[in-house]
Amino acid sequence: MKWRRIKAIVVKESLQIVRDPRSLMIVLLIPLLQMFMLGYGVNLDVQHIPLCVHDREGSQASQGLLHQFAASPYFSLQAPMGSDAEIRKSLDSGRCNLAIVIPAGFSKGLADNGGGSVQALLDATDSNTANIAANYARSVVAAYSAGVQMEFIRNRGGTVQTLTPVDMQARVWFNEDLVSRNFIVPGIVALVMAIVGAQLTSLTIAREWERGTMELLISTPVQPMELMIGKLLPYFLVGMVDASICLALAVFWFEVPFRGTLTALFLTTGLFLTVVLCIGYYVSVAIRSQVGASQVALLLTMLPTTLLSGFTFPIDQMPPAVQAVTYIVSARYYVTIIKALFLKGSAWTALLAPILCLALYALVMVFFASRAFRKTLD
Amino acid sequence: MSACAAVAIEVDGLEKRFGALTAVAGLSFSVRPGEIFGLVGPDGAGKTTAMRMLASVMRPDAGRIVIDGIDVLASPEQAKSHISYMPQRFGLYEDLTVDENIRFYADLFDVPARVWQARAEKLLAAADMTPFRRRLAGQLSGGMKQKLGLACSLVHTPKVLLLDEPTTGVDPLSRREFWQILYSLRSEGVAMLISTAYLDEAERCDRIAMLNAGTMMYCDTPAALKERMPGAMLEIITPDPRAAHDAVRGLPGVRGVLMVGTGIHVHVDSGERRTQIAAALTAAGIGIESLEEVAPSIEDLFLALLEQDGAGEGG
Ligand SMILES: Nc1ncnc2c1ncn2[C@@H]1O[C@H](COP(=O)(O)OP(=O)(O)OP(=O)(O)O)[C@@H](O)[C@H]1O
Ligand SMILES: [Mg+2]
């Protein structure tokens, strides 16, 4: 392998990229457009979640809490239930997604120390909706709880610290702002990068075949590995610019809180980009027409990333066979990592498994892509 | 062929099939250093396919190719650094400039900067292209594109040059410059294999091979081939070549008639037929400006040989 030949191809590809300003604009604008379209289009904010209640106490206090639920636009209160069995039946049949059970000693607890506990039962078939519903419920309870505390303090004196606020047992983590967009935008970054990355390279080999430059190229001593590296490097740069645009939009426009480290973010993004660039390159080698290669690359990246990465449909809710398939979807690892970096601010060590998987994936893809190309017209 | 001369290209029993079609069937020939070897033949004769196998961008189904002592089938990549191949279809990057294209190929062949820069300078001057070094290849004329292609394939001083119809669609001036470069390469000892659709060009080759349906029919120097043609060639200049063509066809002793611009070429079994033919034309009311026996062109030769129904001796 000769660095000089790799450099020659890098220079040639870069010149071709900058000499084609229309394509360059598209390459930089498409991720922008897709981020906006998907960021606003995929809105998982849920309203009018059917809610059942079982008020075991039937006191003024418990009715006050239920009143708050009735007033919330997120819930539509169903007829009150008389027993736990009835609650279970409505959850099973899907008549409600969320049930609130107020225990018998609720008002006594409030009167004694301004604290108490209610139980939330969630139908988690659709865990996204369930998460969101639980969060909304929590916020309603918290608002009620705050009101009770204020009153308690007014009536009895004392400080907030000594009080146990009304607590709801079901809890959802990592999205305190209750904005579903926070869940979805990091996934969209992964989706946009998968699509754009594979598109970038899907044309590169096919173009040489279509324009008739390949025959001359393969009559030179250039090695397949040199050709691949030379062709991927410039697109890696373009892809990282695209990724930065997407990530910046996520943080500054969609205001998704970012809690991880930039090093981890860019390192894993680079790994994922390598994978999708290799997918595009592989397709370009296999399919010698630009239109065909671009369509196959789109199919190969968009479908699995949308359906099997856990970005829209939670993986743990999938049938076991489908869950097994998700392990070969590279976006699965990246979505896990990027969501964790954004929302949890996870440390390196916590993400070691998906990062290693992604790195291994990138290595395997580079290996296959480098071996795919044959210097022959046959 | 003299057995003692060094051989730059040696092809033996080369064969390539595409499904049921045999594109190249048992091709054998050899080319010496400093020799221009022409491949002529009708469309689909297998010229491009043969070139591709020599350039090792296509694998033969059978046969052996040795280029500059290297077995091409065994070590194609090693052979590639000694070969330059100019495909029939323009293979350079139209969105790169003349200089950028040359530099790209110099880099791929790992030619030292000093060497390729000097060479590029010389080649572009010989091709009369020095003022266009910064022009995009896509904006060059057809002739200049081909000259650039030649320049690119020569930056690394190849020992063997494979040119697939390099002058098709090229203006006469550029074509002359192109051949000038080839002649100077001949004196440097480069072996050249050139396929051409222009038969006048074939006559400039040291030897030519005639290909038809993948088989070599004849292989010799242009002069020797012409001598082999039986009978004589009459050139008749007439105001109405088409009528003359129809009138002469089928006369006794006439083996073939070919329209050539201002007249016709008539292949006859003997020069004695001229009076007979002149009489027939006059009888048909066709004017004759001149009627002479001429040396056959390669085109005449080719048609004459094909008429013999491929019964000729192999190359
Ligand atoms: N890749 C291919 N697949 C199938 N058939 C092919 C292929 N390449 C060439 N052929 C066929 O092989 C035969 C020889 O083709 P080739 O291109 O070698 O002829 P040629 O002498 O170069 O013709 P031309 O003067 O048109 O360039 C033709 O019948 C052609 O259709
Ligand atoms: Mg051809």
Image: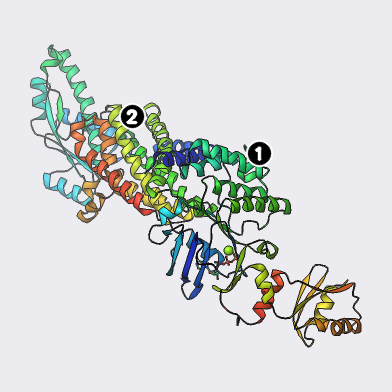
Where does label 2 land, which residue? A256
Quarter of the render that holds ligand 1: bottom right
Viewport quadrant of the C terminus of chain A: bottom left
Q: Is residue A45 visible?
A: no
Viewport quadrant of the N terminus of chain A: top left
Crowding at dot 1, Cα within 10 Å, few <14 / some 14-19 / many 20+, comes out as: some
Residue placed most toward the observer, B315 or B197: B315
Instruction: Name the residue located 12 percent from the left edge and 44 percent from the top edge.
Output: A84
Query: Residue flagged by tag 1: what amino acid is it?
Result: Thr
Kindly tell me whether mark 2's CB lies below 8 Å from ligand 1.
no
Residue placed most toward the observer, B276 or A261: B276
- Indicate the quadrant where residue B66 lies: bottom left
From what the image shows, is residue A209 above or below residue A172? below
From what the image shows, is residue A146 above or below residue A222? above
1 vs 2, front mark = 1
The residue furthest bottom is: B252
Element marked by disc 1:
helix
Residue B54 position in % (x across, y down): 49, 61
